[in-house]
Amino acid sequence: MIRFFAAPIAAIALLSAMAGGTRAEEFDSRDIMGGGPNFFRGGSSPIPRTTVNYNGNYAPGTIVVNTSERRLYLVLQNGQALRYGIGVGRDGFRWGGVHRITAKKEWPAWTPPSQMLARRPDLPRHMKGGIENPLGARAMYLGSTLYRIHGSNEPETIGQAVSSGCFRMTNDDVTDLYSRVSVGTTVVVLNN
């Protein structure tokens, strides 16, 4: 049994040594084994997830999306919140209101709505879930709207206004948020 694991571990050590210098510092064996920082191919967010002081009047567990800041807050206890960078709707596609998460899906399939297909007839009519899917690793569906909080394989869009109204997060961040909330969670979208 020990021999079974020895070869892969030796190969990883050899790759690390061969990488040399700064490259060796960037190497993470979890990338090969699964679960490392590049596992979701979504890259890291240009806006790191962080815990911040938060003075809103929302109950812990509430998600507050601030479209002008391009940030999503998960309200915690004691006047704090987890702050995530997000991509928001481009001009003409931003919206506000209060909804609840009505469904959560891992590696969701994507069917572009008819409004999007009218604008972009080149899009596929349906795409099964997976790493190439534009909804990314997780999606949380918002009420009866067409909108979601979902992952993205384009981390460069985080902090930008590029979507058709959905809120994009890196796959790492959306997976983290997904694990912390449940169906029924209140989502407040501020469109200042």
Image: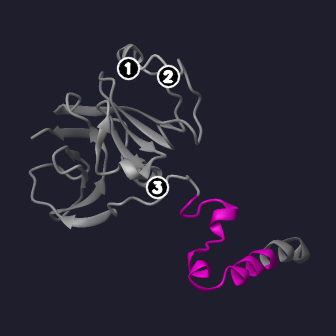
Q: Residue at the spot x=16%, y=33% of the render?
A: 96
Q: Is residue 167 above or below residue 74?
A: above
Q: Is residue 177 above or below residue 26?
A: above
Query: Crowdedness of circle 1 by 10 Å Cα count: few (<14), some, many (20+)?
Result: few
Q: Which residues are magenta?
A: 10-38
Q: Is residue 183 left or right of residue 21?
A: left
Mark 2: secondary structure: loop
Kind of residue at disc 3: Asp
Q: In the rendered image, which residue does mark 1 sit on?
A: 116
Among the two numbered marks 3 and 1 on one chain, the one whose residue lies closer to the N terminus: 1
Which of the 4 image quadrants contains residue 192?
A: top left
What is the spatial separation of the Cα atoms under label 3 and label 1, in whole angstroms? 26 Å
> Can you tell which of label 3 and label 1 is closer to the viewer?
1
Kind of residue at disc 1: Met
Kind of residue at disc 2: Leu
Magenta stretch, overall SS: helix
Q: In the rendered image, which residue does mark 2 sit on?
A: 123
The x, y position of residue 140, in whole percent, is 39, 37
Nearer to us in this view, 158 or 144:
158
Among the two numbered marks 2 and 1 on one chain, the one whose residue lies closer to the N terminus: 1
Asked whether 99 falls inside the magenta stretch, the response is no
Q: Residue at the spot x=57%, y=33% of the render?
A: 129
Mark 1: secondary structure: helix
What is the spatial separation of the Cα atoms under label 2 and label 1, in whole angstroms? 9 Å
Nearer to us in this view, 66 or 101:
66
